[in-house]
Amino acid sequence: MSAEAAPEPSTITILGRSATSFDEQYPIRPGRVAPTNVFKAEGVRVIHLTFAVGQSLKEHRTPMPAMLHVISGRVLFDADGHRDELLPGAVVYMSGGAPHAVTALAESRLLVVLQTAE
């Protein structure tokens, strides 16, 4: 993850005003997946992921429940023996410990929201 610290939360924090809000701040880097912590508050952490075409996160598990939101691009999402192509606007919920993998079919941006505490 990026060494950059996520901003401290206030009562209301707007993380992005549109689907393109993160484009300039977090450019897609050729040949790699680039995760950045963009927000952390009690019980939640938000990570912005950029994927260059063809890049992937191999099968892994997140110990806590998570939601994945495709902001832009196209990705293949593999989980539970199924492969789904996800497009902008797609949202996926994963219970803690669920094995999954993501591969970019196009330059892509995802937000992952992790539930860090009950």
Image (tube, rainbow, N blue to C red):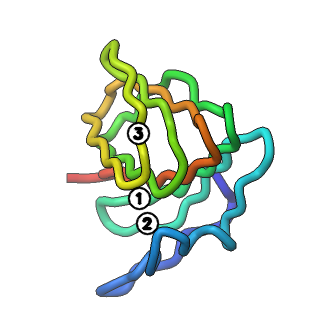
User: Looking at numbered disc 2 in the image, what kind of residue is underneath it?
Assistant: Lys
Between the C-alphas of marks 2 and 3, the distance is: 26 Å
User: Looking at numbered disc 1 in the image, what kind of residue is underneath it?
Assistant: Arg
User: Looking at numbered disc 3 in the image, what kind of residue is underneath it?
Assistant: Leu
- What is the total number of numbered labels drawn onto the structure image? 3
The answer to whether marks 3 and 1 mark residues whose Cβ atoms lie closer than 8 Å is no
Within 10 Å of the Cα at label 3, are there few (<14), some (14-19), or many (20+) other Cα atoms? many
How far from the left and from the top, in percent, is residue 61?
Answer: 42, 28
In percent of the image, x 71 and y 62: which residue is there? 27
Label 2 SS: strand
The answer to whether marks 2 and 1 mark residues whose Cβ atoms lie closer than 8 Å is yes
Precedes in sequence: disc 2 or disc 1:
2
Q: Is residue 11 left or right of residue 70?
A: left
Q: Is residue 78 left or right of residue 47?
A: left
39 above or below 94? below
Precedes in sequence: disc 2 or disc 3:
2
Q: Is residue 112 visible?
A: no
For residue 86, the mark is 3
Circle 1 is placed at which residue position?
45
Within 10 Å of the Cα at label 1, are there few (<14), some (14-19), or many (20+) other Cα atoms? some
**Disc nearest the viewer among 3 and 1:** 3
In percent of the image, x 42 and y 45: which residue is there? 87
How far from the left and from the top, in percent, is residue 69?
Answer: 39, 52
For residue 40, the mark is 2
Between the C-alphas of marks 3 and 1, the distance is: 22 Å
User: Where on the picture, by quarter, is residue 45?
Assistant: bottom left
